[in-house]
Amino acid sequence: MDIDTNERPEITYRPFTEADFDAVAKVCARTWASDVEGVYDRITFGRVLTAGSLRRSQFSFVAQQGIKVVGACFGGFAKDGAIIVNEHWEQRFKELMVPARKRAKIGGPSVEELLFSRLRMYTTADVFISRGYSNADAELNLCVVDPAARNQGIGSAMLEEAVMRFCEHGARGFFTMLTKNSDCQFSERAGLKLIQEKRGVYGDPNAGVIYLYGRRL
């Protein structure tokens, strides 16, 4: 009997646990920091991104293939014009930012831009939420798939689950923040539309562009 060596293990979806933290951080690093020199800098960025997303989230789950975490999706809700903050992950984020800021100073422009573009995204998101738009009721903080596990429908399945949770919560719409390294076409195929484009700190055209995409429900 011939064995198909290309057959992949089944994909399952389950709630995120703290034991998944570094696995998700590594997926983020492989996705958005693959061009950064130094393993430590890549995983530092991945941890900051993961904790930063969790601190703004009220639900979180992962995609697992075999024994490996290959994707993650985090989402949060706004109340009274502000994102609801997860206090546990807020503290973890602050702790991780201390070494991250030090590494950003010596890691070069690419490391600085990875870190500080993420902080600009949080600020832009907070301003958007404060204005009370219908698609600011909920925020898709993270939807990432390991590059080696793509083209299996994992991202679409996770986004569909997130949308269902947004609807169950009564959100009128949701938004997400993206960078030039994000798959904007994936978001557009899922019905999200570009709402805002922001260039760098104080409009610096040489810094990275961030995008705000939204969708009404």
Image (tube, rainbow, N blue to C red):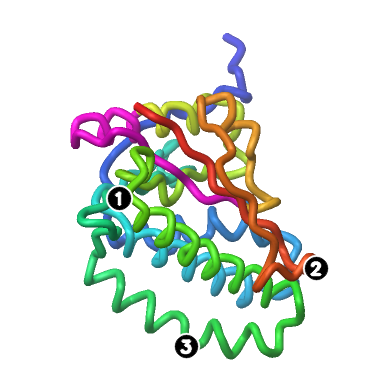
Which label sits on residue 206? 2
* Start-end of magenta stretch: 161-178
Q: Label 3's element? A: helix
Q: Label 1's element? A: strand
Label 2: how many Cα within 10 Å (few below 14, some 14–19, many 20+): few
Asked if residue 88 is among those painted magenta in the image, a careful observer would answer no
> Real-space Cα distance between discs 3 and 1?
25 Å
- Furthest-right residue in this view: 206
Left or right: residue 203 compared with residue 118: right
Q: Residue at x 78, y 65 (%)?
A: 205
Which of pointers 1 and 2 indicates the residue nearer the eye?
A: 2
Q: Residue at x 55, y 42 (%)?
A: 195
Q: Position of residue 181 (x, y in %)?
A: 68, 51
Query: Can the viewer see residue 68?
Result: no
Label 1: how many Cα within 10 Å (few below 14, some 14–19, many 20+): many
Residue 184 in which image quadrant: top right
The tag earlier along the polypeptide, 3 or 1, is 1
> Real-space Cα distance between discs 2 and 3?
26 Å
Q: Amino acid at mark 2?
A: Asn
The tag earlier along the polypeptide, 2 or 3, is 3
Asked if residue 163 is among those painted magenta in the image, a careful observer would answer yes
Q: Residue at x 80, y 68 (%)?
A: 206
Residue 136 in which image quadrant: top left
Residue on which the image places disc 3: 98
Which label sits on residue 76? 1
Left or right: residue 185 compared with residue 73: right
Towards the viewer: 41 or 156:
156
Q: Give above or below for 89 relative to 71.
A: below
Q: Amino acid at mark 1?
A: Gly
* Quarter of the image that includes the N terminus: top right
Q: Give above or below for 59 relative to 87.
A: above
The tag earlier along the polypeptide, 1 or 2, is 1
